[in-house]
Image (spheres, rainbow, N blue to C red):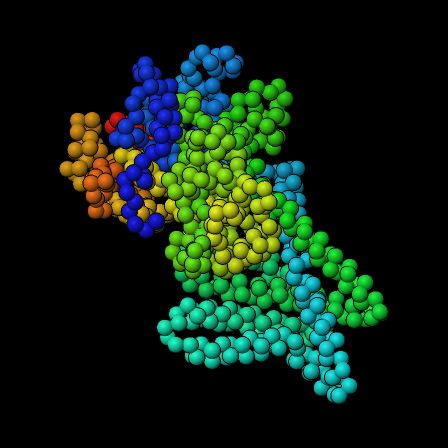
Amino acid sequence: MNTPLPQSAHLQSAAELAAIAHSRSIRLENQTVPPVVTSQSLRALCLSGGGIRSATFAAGICNSWAQKEGHLLRQFDYLSTVSGGGYFGGFFGRMFMAYANHSSTEQQLTAKPDVRRVYQRLADVKSENMQYLRRNGRYLAKSGDEAFIAAGFLLRNFLWLHLLLCSALLPIFTLLHLLNILAFKPLHSLFNNEQSQWVSGFIRLEWALVLISVLVFLLSTIVYYCYPASAINRLRKIARLQGQLVLFGCASIALAIVNTLAPALHQYSGSIGAAMLLVAGVLYRFYPLLSELSPRFHQLHYVAAVLALLMVASYSLLFSLIGFQLALISYALPQDNYGWYGQYYLLWFLLCWVFSYQRDLINRSSLNTLYSARLRRAYLGAANQYRFNETDEQKEAVSSYHAQDDMPLTTYQPQQFGGPVHIINVTINRTLSPHSKLWQPDRQGLNLAVSSVIADNPAAIYAANPEQQWLAQREQLALAKWLAISGAAVSTGMGAHTKWYTSLILALFNLRLGYWWGAERRGNGNHFYSCLAKELTSRYDNKPGCSWYLSDGGHFENLAAYEMIRRRVPRIVIIDAGQDSTFAYADLANLVRHARIDFGYDFKCASEQQTQALFGDKADISQLQNLAGCPADLKNTIAGDPQPKRACLLVGHYSAKFTQNDPPAAPIYVLYIKPNLTGNEPIDITNYQQQFSEFPHQSTGDQFYDEAQWESYRKLGQHTADELYYLVNAFIA
């Protein structure tokens, strides 16, 4: 992954090229036969992550570019989306399935799909589809029964997760306390009451585990130096054993300290429990804000790490206190019945363990189910024509379930009806190498692009990465589920942003939007305890045949252009609506870095000569220079920049060495568009910015847009696209 791949590894599959040719024959109406698709004729539109901000800004872009019966949007062969861009991308692709299609089977066989119906509805801001999106800006927060249903869902999953966690850990703490009581009972007669309390409080079996690990470590050290330096394999095995002993010893010390404190603090259990609940409530309320601020303020990482350690200590102490109380109760029971009590205890433990093998329990207990249901009803529902044909008004409400909202990814094929090939990007979390088990400190994830193009196996998902085409053997998911996974920003696994303390806190509070993607083969379900342990410790691998943890595509690359560069698409338009109030261009820098390392493309701001060569007579260069510049020129006029721009033009040259089998590649041009205020916006947008100074880069944590906020982002997108219409048209022509 870290070396440029040969050119053949980046080219499109035959299935994709055939799908694009079929799509062009429909959307480019002047073509009487399917046009020949060449690598230099491909065009891509990329919608970045950014939650509802990105989806709403993209809606405004589409309102503008869908004018003239979609003349401009028809030029794009690919639609690549990440996270919030996928909200609108799913709606856009679903519109072709609903409105370009014909109602009867006979018409489908004899008539071409009519894409004009799609673009007419997208261009009309008063169409029932756009109005539906407007009404559901608060797609995550609903009032009335929906709010109580969501609250019940969150509480149920939170309690269920901790019930299973308690069932696994509480027997261990109880058994340790009971063994200590029974083991040291004979010693109590040798001491007075004060000495007896000291013995029972500080001489415990757990310290014996620490002593054993120390002794084995010393013994292995002697053995290590007995071998000659040439016996590398044996020395490595001993070194690995010593590393495991260090880990085991540290865990034993922590366990001994917690179990030593529990008897001493037993009489204060009520106060300690109340304090823990208070601390947990504060963390639950403020941690999302802390996690959002931590990338900006590095010192907050240490605060989060301390909070995570305190949380683990408190959680362990709570289990130890409960276990000590249960041990005292068990000790007070008639000892003749210990065998019966032990059997019941063991039966409870085994039942919980067996139940944890229930397929998909780890996913059903997360927030992904609620999240995907809300996205399905809000964004895919907006493109479901059956919602608007109902006589019952309740059927149109977003709170109502409609079976036609969603569909399997294998049947989601907008390119069959004149739409683009939709690429949905997600991140496969990999903090451990599947081969060496070494920690991966940088990316900690791989990009996975799932496409609506079907591979040779009609029941398969075609994964865009050439080395991952065998992913068809894995679990098949619906469109809404993939969109939810692509937008799973708050998760225990976050690709390059994964931190052990973040994973720990989010897992214990059950703030998990990611998805465990299991193998399709029978018997490879997601075991609850093994998956939860990986989430708590942020240790993920992606071995074949095992479950993989998927999360937001922005955790790897947030502009959705990575796969387009992999395919060497020569013209790429990027709509970057990610949060970037300081105009630091972190997402663009990340893309440029990945393109150079992985594909050998070095992107720079296009020079005047390159711009002239690209556009020629197709655009007024002076007008172009007023609209587009380098990234440094994309500044907010409110912030004092005298000449802000709407976009910038980048050109990427293939800088890797090539051979006869890998000839020089053509340059890739990227038109990069960013939400920006240049001073000529409508008065309502200017007024909104005066009220909320961070607009148009308000926090991504805000996913509950009111009417004014939703319309401000949509109108800004439309205004931006109107100004750039002829520039973009000349760019992709």
In this view, 127 is above or below 705: above
Q: For residue 652, what is the image quadrant?
A: top left
Q: Residue furthest left?
A: 609
Report whether residue 406 is seen. yes
Quarter of the rendering occupied by the C terminus: top left
Q: x, y (%) of residue 606? A: 21, 40
Residue displayed at 61% across by 25% down: 395
Q: x, y (%) of residue 113? A: 43, 17
Return the residue nearer the eye: 547 or 113. Answer: 547
Q: x, y (%) of residue 572? A: 30, 35
Residue displayed at 59% across by 67% down: 313
Report whether residue 683 is seen. no
Residue displayed at 63% across by 74% down: 206
56 sits left or right of 649 in the view: right
**Count of labels in the image:** 0
Residue displayed at 51% across by 68% down: 244
In this view, 468 is above or below 100: below
406 sits left or right of 263 in the view: left
96 sits left or right of 5 in the view: right
Return the residue nearer the eye: 632 or 112. Answer: 112
Q: x, y (%) of residue 721? A: 33, 31
